[in-house]
């Protein structure tokens, strides 16, 4: 096939941070079409400023099932038989801050789960027929090393409990998705500790660096990678 054949990306949480930077970098390549989902497109000024004819901005609140269904209908009409080559579940929250297992607010834990686990699960359920239609057939779940049981990150081992628990669940979601559908490639990825609203100003990497790595790795995955936990450098992470 021609290397210039259109590649369709669907990305959640694109109004800022990783999703915005991913959209920006992808649109530099004319062969990419990006369907960028966010809660309030009318307020997503930075996202809408990227418009170049290959960007489609759609409304999506991942915790609202009716919103997910409506978005899926809209996207189906947009892509037709081309489908979605790369479905990127990026939208996420870390509302619990530096909470621990002994002081976390259970309402916050529930809200975090709704956004970080249930949201990606339902988005994928609704859009997987479009992924199956595409050439690449890839689902990418943006996760975190904080979701690993095996890795004990210095200074954070007992902190960020709500967020970490939700990302561990997302990693298991990835495993179940990969094992349950051999037609597609499903991976979860650690994008690095990035200077975003979620990562904070003291993070180790600029968001552009992490996103460049994520895109390089995800566009090179093969069926053998399905179900794996990988970082932005292409290294496999412990569960």
Image: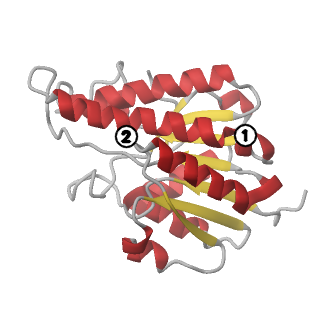
Looking at the image, the residue that sits furthest to the front is 66
Looking at the image, the residue that sits furthest to the right is 1
Q: Is 3 above or below relative to 110?
A: below
Report whether residue 172 is seen: yes
Q: Is 167 situated left or right of 199 in this image?
A: right
SS class, disc 2: helix
Q: Position of residue 171 (x, y in %)?
A: 46, 27
Q: Say which quadrant the N terminus sits in.
A: bottom right
Q: Say which quadrant the C terminus sits in.
A: top left
Label tally: 2
- Residue at (27%, 57%) from the top-left corner? 197
Numbered label attached to residue 129? 1
In the image, 147 versus 104, the foreground residue is 104
- Residue at (62%, 33%) from the top-left corner? 186
- Residue at (20%, 55%) from the top-left corner? 202
Q: Is 214 above or below relative to 201?
A: above
First-in-chain label (2 vs 1)? 2
Residue placed under numbered mark 2 in the picture: 115
Report whether residue 232 is seen: no
Numbered label attached to residue 159? none
Q: Is 135 situated left or right of 188 in this image?
A: right
Q: Position of residue 83 (x, y in %)?
A: 75, 51
In the image, 149 versus 6, the foreground residue is 6
């Amino acid at each position: 096939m021609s290397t210039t054949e259109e590649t369709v990306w669907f990305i959640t949480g694109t109004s800022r941070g990783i999703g915005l930077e991913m959209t920006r970098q992808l649109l530099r390549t004319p062969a990419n079409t990006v369907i960028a989902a966010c809660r309030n497109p009318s307020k997503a000024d930075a996202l809408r400023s990227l418009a170049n004819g290959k960007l489609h901005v759609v409304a999506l609140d991942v915790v609202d099932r009716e919103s997910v269904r409506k978005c899926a209908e809209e996207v189906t009409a947009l892509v037709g038989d081309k489908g979605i080559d790369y479905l990127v579940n990026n939208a996420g929250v870390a509302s619990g801050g530096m909470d621990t297992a002994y002081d976390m607010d259970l309402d916050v834990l529930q809200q975090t789960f709704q956004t970080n686990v249930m949201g990606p699960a339902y988005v994928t359920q609704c859009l997987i027929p479009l992924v199956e239609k595409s050439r690449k057939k890839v689902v990418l779940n943006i996760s975190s090393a904080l979701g690993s049981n095996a890795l004990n990150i210095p200074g954070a081992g007992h902190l960020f409990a709500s967020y970490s628990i939700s990302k561990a669940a997302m990693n298991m979601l990835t495993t179940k998705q990969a094992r349950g559908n051999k037609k597609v490639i499903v991976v979860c990825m650690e994008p690095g500790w990035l200077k975003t609203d979620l990562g904070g100003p003291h993070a180790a990497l600029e968001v552009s660096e992490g996103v460049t790595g994520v895109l390089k790795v995800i566009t090179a995955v093969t069926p053998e990678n399905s179900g794996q936990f990988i970082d932005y450098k292409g290294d496999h992470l412990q569960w």
